[in-house]
Amino acid sequence: MTAVTAVPELNPRVSPIEGVRQSLTLAWRTVVQVRHNPWELGDFSIQPIMFVLLFTFVFGGAIAGDTSAYLTFMLPGMIVMNMLFVTLYVGQGLNTDLTKGVFDRLRSLPIARWAPLAGRIAADQVKQAWSILLVLAVGMVLGFRFGTNLASVLGAIALLLVFALAFSWVSVLVGVLAKDPERVQIFGFTALFPITFVSNVFVPAETMPGWLQAFVNVNPVSILADACRGLMLTGAEATPIIQTLVWAAAIAAVFAPLSVWAFKRRV
Amino acid sequence: MNHAIWAEGLVKRFGETTALDGVDLGVRTGTVLGLLGPNGAGKTTAVRVLSTLLKPDAGHARVGGYDVVNDAHQVRQLIGLTGQYAAVDEMLTGTENLLLIGRLLGHPKRQAKQRARELLADFGLADAADRAAKTYSGGMRRRLDLAASLVGRPPMLYLDEPTTGLDPRARSELWNLIRSLVAGGVTVLLTTQYLDEADELCDEIVVIDHGRVIASGTPGELKSKTGAQTLAVRPEDEVHLPVVTSVVAELAKVTPDVEGQLVTAAVTDPAVLPAVVRRLDDAGVVVTELALRSSSLNEVFLSLTGHPAEEDEETERTMA
């Protein structure tokens, strides 16, 4: 074989600033998808709205003796539950890109290796903020009222987003391991339903048998729900907020390296 | 001649499967190389290695003088990749798909929009520019996919089975697009399962099977080696079978295959057909079938390897 064609000097690597810009471009892509198909968010948003209505008006009277008292108790937890389901978007979107070959195209471009994943996760944060506001809005229409100040409510939203960011790594792992996007959803529902229901979101833990209480009390869903109740209703409490942050750090510490490992194996 | 793409001794294993078993190939600048082979031959793996998506287990490859492993980022600045599956975002419109690539390549917004418009017009997608890609036909998606790989005007282009699954019209449209790209100076590495596609588009063909190169050359050279066409003759009366077989053997200069009453042989010279007609007519043999048709990939494989092209699953695509 003969010598290869001489070419001009090319850039040997991507700068971190370019990488951030590329991630934002890829996040833009996901947000545009939502703009084209706003009902996509409805898939996940209708369910919590239905749950809000169902639990408030059907079970609320029986559980709390009063529908509006129950709405106040349940809505912060409902937001936590919804947030967990919305993280499934990351895995689903990632899996769609992997199975459809979009990921190969992105990887063949001269962009930062981490940009596609970072873009996905950044876009998911936008969806999270949107769906948190949506559930809050429905709650307020039904009569939910904050008992604290604006700073505390924003703090609750920030805490939810931090936890969502950490939990997104679980979704990334599922998205990388699953054969197709449907399986991501199936996994999500089978895993998330017990985790979210076996918590203090819908009923106080004290009403459950002792062995179940043990689980409910360490379940990060309960802890985050407690933190949000405090921040939205009765005043911020340090313990659940700190515990939530510890849980978030632990989840990210386990699942981020696992996801990256699985990702490198698949592509 | 300079080689834009050059690979030596590429080996890639997936567990027990050896997808590439020491592949050498070179694509001269400004030409089209066809990588021809059945499913599972290793074509896609070769493209994935040459486009930096996979690291080879052994061997090395250079694209535009840059090593695909050590200088992957530079290689990515030189290549466009159109995969087997139209890799477009179905939720985005045609324009948005191209805009996304342009912005990722660091083009300013106005320039990216301009380039998107230009490509959509060139690829006959101007009318569908603002429709979501999921509403596109198969041919339109492939064209959009090809357009997406050209946003950065790459000097080297990989086309992995660009026409698989397309109807004949969409296929010939895509062929014309590829020809005009080559006329514009782009170097192309194309994989295909179709002999006619390789024949139509390629300056050189490398035939691979089970991860090994089993033949290479210009389409003309390959045809003369393997027989580009197949002559088929079926005598009406079984008693004439030996006569037919010997006439075909003599004129085609190969030992014909006999299956039932059908005699087939690979031929390189189209003049064999009229010669066979005259000889059989002279001998008073009546035939119910007499045809000269293009060899299929199977027949080429049969003559190159002695075994038919196996319909293996593309093992390299199966994932956990």
Image (cartoon, coloured by chain):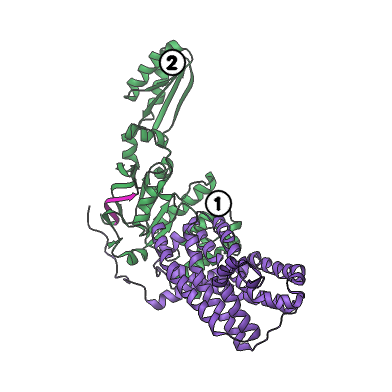
Tally of numbered discs: 2
* Chain A shade in the render: purple
Residue A124 visible within the image = yes
Label 2 amino acid? Asp
Q: Using the image as rendered, state which of residue A262 and residue B273 is in the foreground.
A: A262
| Relative to A142, residue B184 above or below | above
Q: Residue furthest left?
A: A2
Look at the image and give the residue range highlighted in magenta: B4-14
Give me the chain that's green.
Answer: B
Decide: few, some or many residues near mark 2? Use Cα within 10 Å; few <14, some 14-19, many ≥20. few
Tag 1 residue: B138
Image coordinates of residue B153 in percent, x first then y, are 41, 64
Image coordinates of residue B12 in percent, x first then y, are 32, 51
Tag 2 residue: B281
Q: Using the image as rendered, state which of residue A162 and residue B5 is in the foreground.
A: A162
Image coordinates of residue A243 in percent, x first then y, are 51, 78
Q: Which residue lies furthest to the front in this view?
A: A210
Helix, strand or loop for disc 1: helix
Chief secondary structure of the magenta span?
A: strand
Decide: few, some or many residues near mark 1? Use Cα within 10 Å; few <14, some 14-19, many ≥20. some
Residue B183 visible within the image = no
A255 sits left or right of A218 in the view:
left
Helix, strand or loop for disc 2: helix
